[in-house]
Amino acid sequence: MTSSRISRTGGSQYGQALIVGVIIGLLLLAGGNYWRQYQIKRAETASLLYESLLTDLQQGKSDSVSAAATKLMQDYEATPYAGKSALLMARLRFDARMSLACATHLEWP
């Protein structure tokens, strides 16, 4: 066999695999970028919600504080704001002499 005949055979034999490999690599990169952007957006949303929680706390809006803290603990449990919200709610319950509710917040995952 001549070298040009071998390269044509090898090119057609491995060309499709190369194209599939490149496509899979691009899809993995796109998926990774999407996941990173998704995580950043969730963290930003949790941050804004926690900021509004603190503002409501300063203004004495206890119902809004409780609702925001509950949302953070349920929907954004993987962020540090959820843990901070649980501690804040525990302190508020302790100040209100609600020891059982305080313990529940302290035992939050």
Image (tube, rainbow, N blue to C red):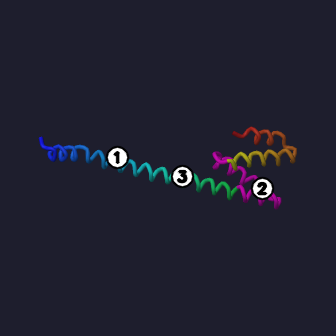
Secondary structure under tag 1 reads helix
Q: Name the residue under label 1.
A: 21
Q: Which residue is outermost to the left?
A: 1
Q: Disc 2 vs disc 1: Cβ atoms closer than 8 Å?
A: no
Secondary structure under tag 3 reads helix
Q: Where is residue 88 in the image (x, y as percent from the top left)?
A: 78, 48
Disc 3/disc 2 C-alpha distance (Å): 33 Å
As shown in the figure, which amino acid type bears the numbered disc 1? Gly
- The disc, 3 or 2, on the residue closer to the chain's N-terminal end is 3
Q: Which residue is outermost to the front?
A: 3
As shown in the figure, which amino acid type bears the numbered disc 3? Arg
Q: Residue at x 72, y 40 (%)?
A: 108
Disc 2/disc 1 C-alpha distance (Å): 54 Å
Which stretch is magenta? 50-79
Q: Main secondary structure of the magenta part?
A: helix
Q: Which one is closest to the eye, mark 2 or mark 1?
A: 1
Q: Where is residue 30 in the image (x, y as percent from the top left)?
A: 45, 53
Left or right: residue 102 compared with residue 5? right
- The disc, 3 or 1, on the residue closer to the chain's N-terminal end is 1
As shown in the figure, which amino acid type bears the numbered disc 2? Asp
Secondary structure under tag 2 reads helix
Q: Which one is closest to the eye, mark 3 or mark 2?
A: 3
Indicate whether 57 appears above or below 91. below
- The disc, 2 or 1, on the residue closer to the chain's N-terminal end is 1
Front-most of 83 and 90?
83
Label of residue 36 in the image: 3
Instruction: Report the quarter where the N terminus lies.
Output: top left
Label of residue 63 in the image: 2
Q: Residues within 10 Å of mark 3 (few under 14, many from 20)?
A: few
